[in-house]
């Protein structure tokens, strides 16, 4: 993937994000990209099967948490460069700068995954109207491979298209997805968020009045 600004290969000043207890859903033949909006920030992680990394990077990463963890950390720089070359998070005009956080591994019933956390380093003056996620990792070398992107918002930070979590599939023929963002999703816009919260309180208040009126009849 090309046409994006350079990304930091060093450790992030602040951590990225990875979901808990996802091993059961990892197929062993797919990569996974997670992106979450938390407190006005975009945080995420990329999960790639170590066997696929061995093929595309010419490595010999072992399976299993105990052996794979130190091996992945030893090849961290290669992993960061690879993810930076094949992952894009941005808007319709450009990719945003990413900073990479910790690396670790996760072993599922179908194999071991290398995980690299990241965060968007951009500073926003207002919320973006769309978030674009592009990814062609592994698929550029294995056209039969796919990847899943999951975007979500933390509780209290709105949603994408009124859903707290959305999953989409990447393929060699479809390496980009666009996610429209509702105003209250982005917590950096305090005024907008407060207005949304106010509307919700008014709505709840009206419902309470209706219930009290009905019970008094």
Image (tube, rainbow, N blue to C red):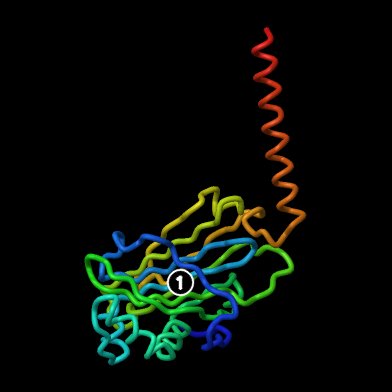
Query: Residue 148 at x, y = what percent?
Result: 37, 65
Toward the front, the furthest residue is 66
At a point 25% along the width and 70% down the height, the residue shown is 28
Q: Is residue 118 above or below residue 74?
A: above
* Residue at point 42%, 69% (across, down): 33
Residue at image point 61% right, 50% down: 156
Residue 63 lies, in percent from the top left, at: 24, 78
**Residue at the extreme top:** 217
Residue 102 in the figure: left or right of residue 24? right
Q: Position of residue 11 (x, y in %)?
A: 53, 84
- Residue 127's place in the image compared with 123, above or below, is above
Q: Residue at x 34, y 85 (%)?
A: 70
Residue at the farthest right position: 191
Q: Position of residue 24 (x, y in %)?
A: 29, 59
Q: How many numbered callouts?
A: 1
Image side of residue 120 versus residue 24, left or right: right
Does 55 sit above or below residue 49? below
Against 75, is 19 above or below? above
Of 146 and 79, the residue lying toward us: 79
Q: Quadrant of the C terminus?
A: top right
Give residue 25's quadrant in the image: bottom left
Residue corresponding to mark 1: 45
Q: In terms of image quadrants, where is residue 122?
A: bottom right
Along the viewing direction, whichever of 38 and 58 lies nearer the viewer: 38
Q: Quadrant of the N terminus?
A: bottom left
Label 1 CA crowd tier, 10 Å (few <14, some 14–19, many 20+): many
Q: Secondary structure at mark 1?
A: strand
């Amino acid at each position: 993937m090309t046409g994006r600004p350079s990304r930091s290969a060093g450790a992030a000043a602040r951590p990225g994000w990875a979901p808990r207890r996802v091993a059961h859903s990892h197929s062993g033949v797919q990569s996974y990209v997670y992106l979450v909006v938390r407190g006005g920030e975009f945080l995420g992680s990329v999960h790639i099967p170590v066997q696929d990394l061995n093929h595309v990077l010419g490595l010999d990463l072992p399976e299993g948490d105990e052996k794979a963890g130190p091996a992945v950390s030893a090849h961290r720089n290669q992993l960061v460069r690879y993810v930076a070359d094949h992952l894009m998070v941005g808007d319709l005009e450009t990719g945003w700068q990413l900073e990479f956080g910790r690396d670790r591994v996760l072993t599922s019933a179908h194999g071991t995954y290398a995980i690299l956390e990241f965060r968007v380093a951009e500073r926003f003056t207002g919320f973006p109207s769309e978030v674009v996620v592009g990814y062609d990792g592994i698929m550029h070398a294995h056209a039969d491979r796919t990847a899943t992107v999951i975007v979500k918002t933390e509780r209290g930070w709105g949603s994408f298209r009124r859903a707290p979590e959305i999953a989409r599939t990447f393929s060699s023929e479809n390496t980009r997805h666009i996610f429209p963002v509702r105003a209250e999703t982005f917590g950096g816009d305090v005024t907008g968020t407060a207005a949304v919260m106010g509307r919700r309180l008014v709505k709840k208040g009206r419902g309470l009045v209706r219930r009290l009126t009905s019970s008094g009849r």
